[in-house]
Amino acid sequence: MQNNNDYDQVKIQQYQRNIFSGNLSIHKDKSISSLHFLQFLNVKHVSVWQCENVSLSSIPPTLNRLTVNQCTGVDLSELKHNVQLQFLDIKQNKFSECRFLRTLVNITNLTLINNNLENIAYLRDMAKLNSLIVHQNSLNDITGIQHLKKLTLLNLSYNKIVDISPLESLTNIEELYLNQNQIVSIEALTSFSKLRNLEIFDNYIQDMTPICLHKNIDNWNLYKIGKQQDPTHQHLCTSLNHKCIYGMQELAGRFKHSSNCRKIDSIKRTIYYFLVQIETNTDIYFSKINDLFLQLNSYGTDQ
């Protein structure tokens, strides 16, 4: 049976030539059982892809970036002592509980894509986080996120989120992605004055006026912003459309003295997508949206 020293020597010889600028990728290595050998290599970032039953308990203290993707039989709780980590990426490991992250308070960039998380309460003490991506999980509760004041990028797309009120105090966010959730109100985004990129398509939003006065947004993706939970509620659809039209008028009016054609084109796309989803009072909205297009076109030619 191979002892630890022999194992380390074999792995050192196997991987030392694969290190580039301190980065090492370990991919589909069926013989790997431990990362202890990394202590003898000069690595800063390690990616472990599609490996089985590998122990994470012996990661060297010099390692500050770790990626663990599509690894079965891995005990992620073994990471809890690696407080030196600053970048952590865990994709497609299908874990549903993130208690182990509670002690990793030095992480600035955290990616948790395609897992089974329902809440992120254990992230509340990760006050150094600048970037948080919890894309494609089962989130229905984002309580605790309000403590992450340094966040500038947040991606919570493809979850089951209804209430985004915990985001209200995160006014340093510049990039926000909330696509394909069950969000009804975006009132929490009213004070997001630093927002540059916003994607909230495929939700149940009834009023987009809270974001109408944000002057810094360059990229909008609001397709299907007001999809209906129940198409029989025609009065809700009508109310929603009136509010969205009003919001778009406010957006259009902001660019009367702007030379930013990129923003104007973005709003045109938003209006077009909105037109596609209208199901009631079609003639009224065609007329209003046509007026908006003419208005935006005139802004583009008056510069």
Image: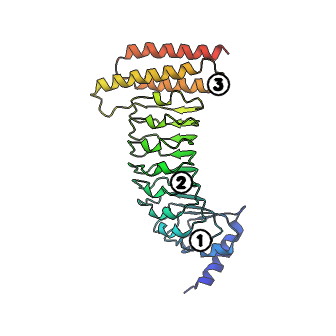
On the rendered image, what quadrant is the N terminus found in?
Answer: bottom right
Q: Is residue 193 above or below residue 118?
A: above
Q: Amino acid at mark 1?
A: Ile
Tell me how many marks there are: 3
Q: Secondary structure at mark 3?
A: loop
Does residue 183 appear in the picture of this structure?
yes
Q: Which residue occupies 63% across, 63% down?
A: 64
Where is residue 38 drawn, in percent x and y? 64, 72
Q: Amino acid at mark 3?
A: Asn
Residue ID for mark 2: 111
Q: Secondary structure at mark 1?
A: loop
Name the N-terminal-most of marks 3 and 2. 2
Residue ID for mark 3: 260
Q: Is residue 143 above or below residue 194?
A: below
Q: Is residue 92 above or below residue 188?
A: below
On the rendered image, what quadrant is the C terminus found in?
Answer: top right
